[in-house]
Image (tube, grey):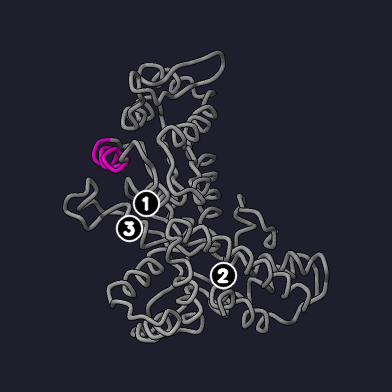
């Protein structure tokens, strides 16, 4: 169902992303980036594509969902390994891989469970695990790092050298790296930093963009046709909600329940505002001393504003002069985390309901 609010795992339930799915399934380079704002369908795209590769080519998928760490200011290598361990235990039917894993330091078998060690004495090296997957698999192994910019918070391991090692030496291991905070993801990968292990490597990139007006209207038409529900307010809905697939899906799902247009629009707007504020509060949790300033900036930018508008509003609120560098840093952080975008001289919300939330 197109209006199913949970991540999709079947192509028939995923609207108009055939080109992006086929592009991802090519696994053209050792590392593949999947980029897009929140709620544009990155996780669904990856889940459907890897599921189809498993059926068509026997590919093995290890899916690490790093969104678990979004509300933390940092997390440990131990926490990362526990999540990886959970995924590795799903591979027990692949006896050849298990035999390869048994050979490396930091892997043990306790009863029917595979355990990964983070102790100093026998700590698992991530690159050794990648080697074991390469050796033990007859087909490609796809490792998904969903919302990989969260790895900037990890303490106890710099994962970039292992990714570079896999890129240069492993033919079967492919790594899909997704991110919705796109500037931050590039900060994590340091692709353009000559000192980065990944400097100079080529990546294939799959980008998911919000629906255009025409795409959004067609999505709504198809969704309601599937449910056999009469509906003729596609354009009005786009004007109110914008083109983010997640919001349109939520609207369709609520309309299915209520059959009341205004109620469904209001429920969607209320839900979006609640979720966006929660995510924004998570963003500023590590910047708490500047919390008030960030809220002022988002209010100024909610309908688009210039750098000078932001500086003027901050100074008017606090009654003191604020340095240009401070203003630049605030705007840079908001841009890197995909809260805002810069169009020529104007800073704007990255999607309409972010603007609505802070108006």
* Residue 157 relative to residue 83: left or right: left
| Magenta stretch encompasses residue 239 | no
Q: Quadrant of residue 41?
A: bottom right
- Whether label 1 touches label 2, CB < 8 Å: no
* Residue 242 relative to residue 102: left or right: right
First of labels 2, 3 by sequence position = 3
* Residue 204 relative to residue 349: left or right: left
| Magenta stretch encompasses residue 166 | yes
Whether 307 is drawn above or below 51: the answer is below
Q: Which residue shows up at 26% across the image and 42% down it?
A: 164
> What is the magenta range?
159-169
- In front here: 16 or 147? 147
Q: Which residue bears the numbered disc 3?
A: 186
Q: Secondary structure at mark 3?
A: helix
- Whether label 2 touches label 3, CB < 8 Å: no
Quarter of the image for the N terminus: give it: bottom right
Point out the residue furthest to the top here.
111
First of labels 1, 3 by sequence position = 1
Quarter of the image for the C terminus: give it: bottom right
* Magenta stretch prevailing secondary structure: helix
Q: Is residue 215 visible?
A: no
């Amino acid at each position: 169902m197109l209006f199913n609010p949970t991540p999709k795992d079947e192509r028939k339930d995923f609207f108009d992303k055939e080109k992006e799915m086929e592009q991802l399934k090519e696994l053209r380079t050792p590392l593949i980036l999947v980029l897009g704002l929140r709620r544009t369908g990155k996780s669904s795209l990856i889940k459907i594509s890897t599921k189809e590769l498993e059926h068509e080519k026997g590919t093995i998928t290890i899916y690490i969902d790093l969104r678990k760490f979004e509300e933390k200011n940092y997390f440990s290598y131990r926490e990362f390994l526990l999540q990886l361990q959970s995924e590795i235990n799903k591979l027990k039917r692949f006896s050849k891989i298990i035999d390869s894993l048994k050979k490396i330091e930091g892997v043990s078998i306790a009863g029917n469970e595979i355990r990964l060690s983070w102790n100093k004495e026998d700590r698992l090296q991530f690159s050794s695990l990648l080697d074991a997957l390469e050796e033990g698999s007859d087909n490609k192994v796809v490792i998904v790092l969903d919302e990989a910019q969260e790895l900037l918070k990890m303490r106890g391991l710099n994962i970039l050298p292992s990714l570079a090692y896999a890129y240069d030496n492993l033919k079967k291991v492919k790594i899909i790296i997704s991110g919705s905070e796109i500037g931050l993801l590039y900060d994590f990968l340091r692709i353009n930093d000559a000192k980065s292990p990944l400097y100079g490597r080529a990546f294939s990139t799959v980008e998911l963009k919000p629906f255009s007006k025409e795409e959004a209207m067609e999505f709504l038409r198809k969704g309601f046709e599937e449910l056999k529900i009469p509906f003729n307010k596609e354009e009005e809905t786009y004007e109110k909600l914008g083109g983010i697939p997640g919001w349109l899906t939520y609207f369709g799902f609520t309309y299915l329940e209520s059959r009341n247009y205004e109620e469904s629009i209001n429920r969607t707007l209320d839900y979006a505002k609640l979720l966006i504020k929660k995510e924004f509060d998570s963003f500023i949790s590590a910047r708490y001393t500047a919390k008030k300033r960030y809220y002022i900036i988002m209010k100024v930018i909610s309908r688009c504003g210039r750098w000078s508008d932001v500086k003027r509003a901050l100074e008017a609120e606090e009654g003191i002069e604020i340095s240009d560098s401070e203003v630049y840093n605030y705007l840079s952080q908001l841009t890197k985390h995909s809260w805002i975008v810069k169009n020529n001289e104007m800073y704007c919300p990255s999607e309409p309901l972010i603007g609505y939330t802070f108006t």
